[in-house]
Image (tube, helix red, strand yellow):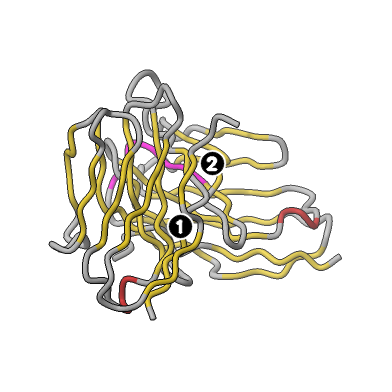
Amino acid sequence: DTGVSQNPRHKITKRGQNVTFRCDPISEHNRLYWYRQTLGQGPEFLTYFQNEAQLEKSRLLSDRFSAERPKGSFSTLEIQRTEQGDSAMYLCASSLREGLSYNEQFFGPGTRLTVL
Amino acid sequence: GQQLNQSPQSMFIQEGEDVSMNCTSSSIFNTWLWYKQEPGEGPVLLIALYKAGELTSNGRLTAQFGITRKDSFLNISASIPSDVGIYFCAGSGDYKLSFGAGTTVTVRA
């Protein structure tokens, strides 16, 4: 399967702990995005990378959040000092910044975070 | 918050029926996309639209990019039980997607 993969699929943590999620995009895709989705809502944009450069961060991404894509391939999203309000599904997507399909973003299965 | 207004919020449909849902925005988008999401999974891309007025089909699905570039609709023809799920519209300028709140479709057998 050559789709977007995310690990772990589920994470339960206690308030105040740090968590890290990983995303592996479709191999030839040079853009990678992170979104957050809460119950009953559509995904909300957090940040995106073109190759290894992080080009935009949403206001939703507080100082406790950091994302990296060190070699322009996989990406990690870290949340420090988790709060109960961080409980959500964290989705990763990738796209190819070329041609007519440049905005077709393909999503991974998500990481469901529960903060107790 | 969400920029897009998606309606209806939910619908119960009879198997074999045609259904329609739409999405409006206060902003102009260059691209409209429609996704389907099932419980515990990520959204799956159904259709992408790139030109105002464009009408595109994917099997029993048909979607249109509104002339004003501020709206789009999705039709599902001859619905079947596996059409159950949440359908999201999304608009994009150049990179990030802005999503509607979704239309939950439940099919009565």
Q: Is residue A81 above or below residue B61?
A: below
Q: Is residue A72 above or below residue B82?
A: above
Q: Does B24 sit left or right of B85 as displayed?
A: left
| Residue farthest along the left direction in this orientation | A63
Residue at image position (20%, 53%) is A66
- Quadrant of the snapshot with the C terminus of chain B: bottom right
Residue at image position (57%, 55%) is B41
Residue at image position (46%, 72%) is A39
For disc 2, the neighbor class at 10 Å (few under 14, some 14 to 19, many from 20) is some
The mark lying in front, picked from 1 and 2, is 1
Q: What amino acid is found at the position of numbered circle 1 in the picture?
A: Thr
Residue B33 colored magenta?
A: yes
Q: Nearer the viewer, residue A99 or A23?
A: A23
Secondary element type, mark 2? strand
Secondary element type, mark 1? strand
Q: What amino acid is found at the position of numbered circle 2 in the picture?
A: Leu
Where in the figure is residue A106, as x and y percent of width and height?
47, 38
For disc 1, the neighbor class at 10 Å (few under 14, some 14 to 19, many from 20) is many
Where in the figure is residue B94, as x and y percent of width and height?
27, 35
Chain assignment, label 2: B
Span highlighted in magenta in the image: B28-34
The label number, if any, that marks residue B45 in the structure image: 2
Q: Does A111 sit left or right of A14 as displayed?
A: right
Chain assignment, label 1: A
Where in the figure is residue B40, as x and y percent of width and height?
57, 61
| Residue farthest along the right direction in this orientation | B109
Find residue B95 and report its image quarter.
Answer: top left
Where in the figure is residue A110, as x and y percent of width and height?
47, 53
The label number, if any, that marks residue A111 in the structure image: 1
Q: Nearer the viewer, residue B106 or A39?
A: A39
